[in-house]
Amino acid sequence: MKVAVFDLGSNTTKLLVADVDVYSSPRIIAEESRACRLTEGGGESIRFPEKSIGRILGILAELLKIARMHKVEVMKAVATEAFRKSENTQELIDLVQESLGLSISVLSGSEEAGAIAAGLLTDPMISGLDDFHAIDIGGGSMEIIAVHKRKVTALESLPLGASVISERFCANASSRWADSACRDAKNFVADLLHSVASSMLSVPCSSLIGSGGTLVFLRAILSGEAGVETKDKSSIAFSESTALFERISQMTLDQRVSSYSSLPSSRADIFPGGLLVLNEVMSYFQKADILHSYHNLRHGIAMKLATE
């Protein structure tokens, strides 16, 4: 069955078109990603501004055209943290339905984490791992998942997305991160991990798997610096990630964009925040490296569609 999955995140809207069945991993036909910073404001009070609403309608219209070009049989649109928190979520959902005929399902944090876990389990790269922990760092939230004997045993969704941390501790997107901001952000992330993720340690963390935009661009940057193909850089060392954070957090936004060609300007402002979260997670689990997977929530939703 040919399916299309639309994923409306805090920073990007993505499309996955795939052939799916219940017996094998999704066969990817097309993948598209469009930058679209959805919200403004911080803390618990955020909303979709008019410019973001107009932009997301245009992006979804474009992605719908691509999905229909591939003659998909089933479409599914899901949304995550920004939609869970925004004051005018229903307004945007109604506009998308009225304008494009596309229904949007807002996933709870646990539903999002479960779909990410299902997606990761479709990755042939980790087919030999029965026990592992996984994280997905998005813009608005971060999901942590424990897997034992290929079954999810625990999951958490935390407000530790790259956008959230960046806006809270370095609100001026064009500036360097102050030493005090770095220290406060690290303490905030570490405290939250210790307070809510203790259940994750009931099963030893034999391997740590990561997905999400922060890992995608970190892998691209480190591959370029090492002079290797991106496909050959699935394992990322803690020392590499922390060293990059120390460098890039002390750059202005313009310096980040000019220094790293593989880091889009639409991501350069929040990338240090995502790196900081990643490093604190690796420290929490005491892991010297993390294995990056390109399989994610969209793959999990696609597999679910095959069984419905």
Image (cartoon, rainbow, N blue to C red):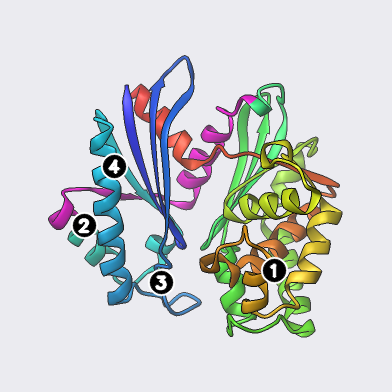
Q: Main secondary structure of the magenta part?
A: helix
SS under mark 1: helix
Q: Residue at x 24, y 30 (%)?
A: 71
Q: Quadrant of the N terminus?
A: top left
Percent position of residue 247, x then y:
79, 70
Depth order, front residue of 8/281: 8
Specify whether residue 54 is painted magenta: no
Q: In screen coordinates, is 47 left or right of 197?
A: left
Which residue in the protein does label 4 denote? 66
Which residue in the protein does label 2 denote? 96
In the depicted structure, whether residue 276 falls above or below residue 16: below
What range of the chain is rendered magenta? 96-124
Q: Amino acid at mark 3?
A: Thr
Q: Earlier in the sequence, mark 2 or mark 1?
A: 2
SS under mark 4: helix
Cβ atoms under marks 4 and 3 closer than 8 Å: no
SS under mark 2: helix
Q: Amino acid at mark 1?
A: Ser
Which residue in the protein does label 1 denote? 259
Real-space Cα separation, disc 4 to disc 3, in angstroms? 25 Å
Cβ atoms under marks 4 and 1 closer than 8 Å: no
Q: Amino acid at mark 2?
A: Val
